[in-house]
Amino acid sequence: MDSLEIIGGNRLVGTVPISGAKNAALPIMTAALLADGEHVFRNVPDLRDVHTMTRLLGRLGVQAVYRDGEVQMTSFGDIQPTAPYDLVKQMRASVLVLGPLVARCGRAMVSLPGGCAIGARPIDQHLKGLSAMGGRVELRHGYVEVTVPRGRLRGADITFDFPTHTGTENLMCAAVLAQGRTTLVNCAREPEVEELARVLNKMGARIEGAGTSVISIEGVESLHPVDHAIMPDRIEAGTFMVASAATEGDMLVDGIGFEPLEAVIAKLREAGAGIEREGGGIRVVGSRPIRPTDVITQPHPGFPTDMQAQLMMLMCLAKGTSRITETVFENRFMHVSELNRMGADIEINGRTAVVRGVDKLEGAEVMATDLRASASLVLAGLVAEGTTHVRRVYHLDRGYEQIEKKLAPLGARIKRVAGNA
Ligand code: EPU
């Protein structure tokens, strides 16, 4: 497995283009299961998770070809509604095929994703919704099997116990072809949910309220294929913003506006970074001292859990103590022990990490088993004294498009080393 070698200490200066959003591309690709014909998705990031999704959709009967940021997907109507373990285990987001499959075929068998690095992540809310819409849900041999005795789901009023991002997306996809109206209450309000609704509406669906906590969907008889460019990745953008703040850099994070990043921008400003709109992007100027700041992760529009590890890295260098509380996932502090090995002073107290700022971090051999945790270690390497090796780049490749190729032109001394564990 490849690793990244980083020699820390350089300021990052220049412009970085932001890629299409992983967490928008994945559900949008599954929407191809809902309509026959040829779909084209543009600005699709070249990521491991995207390629896993093309393979999975191929197995289900949708031919998907990825070329230069564009995915062409052709569905001839012969959908096989079984998502096998060997692909689902590689990517939890595979569960996103469940809603579209049940809507389209009246049945689906999807391997349960199992535990993952950041917590148990059950799908009870997805299943509760499908069952309210007339699906019969059974768990058999590690698979969740949903069958619709009437053949077609029917609209229902469903209240989530708490906002779930992929749960909202799955039920929205299930409801677009259902008979009658579905009302989803306490929905996830992430911009990617709104983007999926935009795509489904372009395909002929009738969805209102996506981006708010109540979404209403009037089922239609059929949908048609779509051509759509994916929105920019707010988490990739946020990660580069932290890189600029941490390295006393001056970076234009290009191709994304303030709106999806309000909570991140507020925290970076509290920490002392200068952040302004510039052209079609966001300019971030880092300076010292970094001020401590407390953070509680929350569903959108709160501070995103997907930026928690990166912000914690910044707080390692603050003048004072910060408290970072993770409320979305129960086990998302894998970066802590690795950051401590680089000289950070972080103590975990239940769901809160108490981060006492230190003067400097030191390069080390590190590794993490979660995408965003790995990103925080790359950021730490950029500011650390000496050389850092981030092992298992595999995880980064799931969610960041060629991170080293974007960092190097900004002045980072970073290279990929093939073949290390
Ligand atoms: N949960 C349940 N039951 C459910 C669904 C969720 O208990 O039926 C719990 C989860 O275990 C978790 C919380 O609810 O504790 C929130 O989970 P959510 O369902 O919102 O997360 P997700 O849909 O599985 C998506 C993103 C994650 C991101 C979270 C939170 C995709 C493909 N994944 O996951 O992205 O962290 O929402 O915003 O959209 C990442 O990109 O690194 C990543 C992990």
Image: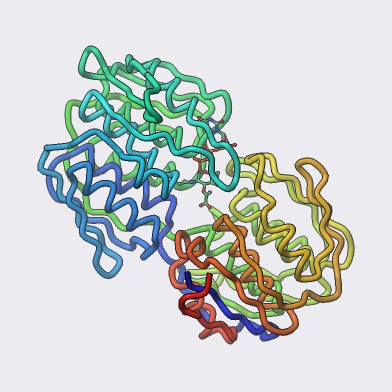
Name the side, left or right, on which 146 lies relative to 187: left
Above or below 231: residue 119: above
Viewer-closest of 281 and 100: 100
Residue at screen point 43% across, 24% down: 127
Residue 73 at what x, y percent from top left?
19, 52
Number of numbered tags placed on the structure image = 0
Residue 157 at what x, y percent from top left?
43, 16
Residue at screen point 61% across, 49% down: 304
Q: Quadrant of residue 42?
A: bottom left
How is the model colour-coded? rainbow
Name the side, left or right, on which 414 lies relative to 8: left
Residue 239 at what x, y percent from top left?
59, 65
Q: Quadrant of residue 335?
A: bottom right
Viewer-closest of 353 and 251: 353
Residue at screen point 43% across, 33% down: 209
Above or below 87: residue 153: above
Residue 317 at what x, y percent from top left?
80, 69
